Amino acid sequence: VDESKLSEEERIVYNALKDIRDPELGFSIVEAGFIDEVKVEDGRARIIYHLSAPFCPPIFALQIGLDIKHKLHSLPFIRESEVILVDHWQSEEINKAIRDYKP
């Protein structure tokens, strides 16, 4: 993510995501480079992320996605969110679980 191209709200979201750590590796998901896209428009946030390998344990992939969604909804200007995992062998199932989660 090129921080210089982020809007003010997107920068706030991106910085908030720095608090989320990969449960297996212990690194911030931002510092690890796992965030591919941050978009915020009219109170709706969209985050696309990946993990270090396509075969990372699904429970960790899901936990990171739920942590992202929870963090987004802790911000007062976010009303809706879309969190998408890419390049993982169980992306479809994990993305459905993230979509269905109500923080």
Image (cartoon, grey):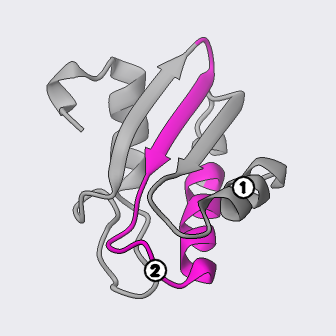
Instruction: Check the image and name the residue furthest to the front.
Output: 89
Q: Earlier in the sequence, mark 1 or mark 2?
A: 2
Instruction: Check the image and name the residue furthest to the top.
Output: 42
Residue 79 found in image quarter:
top right
Residue at mark 1 to residue at mark 2: CA–CA distance? 18 Å
The nearer-to-camera label among 1 and 2 is 2
| Amino acid identity at mark 1 | Ile
Q: Nearer the viewer, residue 34 or 93?
A: 93
**Residue at left offset 35%, top offset 63%:** 29
Residue 53 is situated, as x and y percent measured from the top left of the image, at: 35, 74
| Amino acid identity at mark 2 | Phe
- Identify the mark at residue 98; answer none if there is no mark: 1
**Magenta residues, as a range?**
42-70
Task: Classify mark 1: residues with Cα within 10 Å, few (<14), some (14-19) or many (20+).
Answer: many
- Identify the mark at residue 55; answer none if there is no mark: 2
Q: Up-down: is 97 above or below 56?
A: above
Q: Up-down: is 3 above or below 32?
A: above
Q: Up-down: is 37 above or below 83?
A: above
Q: Nearer the viewer, residue 91 or 74?
A: 91
Q: Please indicate whether residue 69 sits to the left or right of residue 33 in the image.
A: right
Q: Please indicate whether residue 60 sits to the left or right of residue 101 in the image.
A: left
**Residue at left offset 76%, top offset 48%:** 99
